[in-house]
Image (spheres, grey):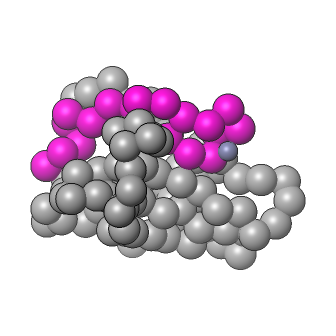
Amino acid sequence: MNDLPNDIAHVLDALLSEDHPLRAQLPYLRIESGCTCGCTAYFTGPDTVTGAEIVAEATIGCDGEVLLFAEGGRLSWLEVCSWTDPKLTLSDAARHLLQEPGAPD
Ligand SMILES: [Zn+2]
């Protein structure tokens, strides 16, 4: 489908519902850069984002949440916020979201 790592693809798939308009961008999405600890993936480059807003979010149990940002209708970055130590990564978020019951197949 595309070059996204499995973790990221899973998280995006879980965050964006089947009929979400931004889903159409997923096949073309590329990771421009990321954070070394694995908590953030930038699709457009961190410098270009000025007015991004949250378009989807999900909690990761009691440990944190994962946020998807877009700017001007374009997906910009995906970030995990940790409420506890150790810090969560996007892989942790993917694992958690995959376990969520009732996910559409
Ligand atoms: Zn990080």
Q: Give the magenta part as a residue range.
A: 24-41
Regarding residue 41, the answer to whether it shows in the image is yes
Q: Residue 43: image x %, image y %?
A: 37, 39
Give how far across and how far down residue 75 sits, in percent. 29, 51
- Above or below: residue 100 compared with residue 88: below
**Residue for point 53% across, 62% down:** 66
Tell me which residue sits at (71%, 63%) in the image. 82
**Quadrant of the rendered image containing residue 96:** bottom right
Which residue appears at 18% of the width and 45% of the height? Answer: 25
Residue 31: name its quadrant.
top left
Residue 104 showing in the rendered view = no
For the residue pair 53 and 100, the one nearer the viewer reads as: 53
Q: Is residue 96 magenta-colored?
A: no
Q: Which is nearer the eye, 13 or 48?
A: 48
The extreme right residue here reads 85
With respect to residue 85, does 45 lie above or below?
above
- Magenta-drawn stretch contains 34: yes
The residue drawn where x is 18% and y is 65% is 20
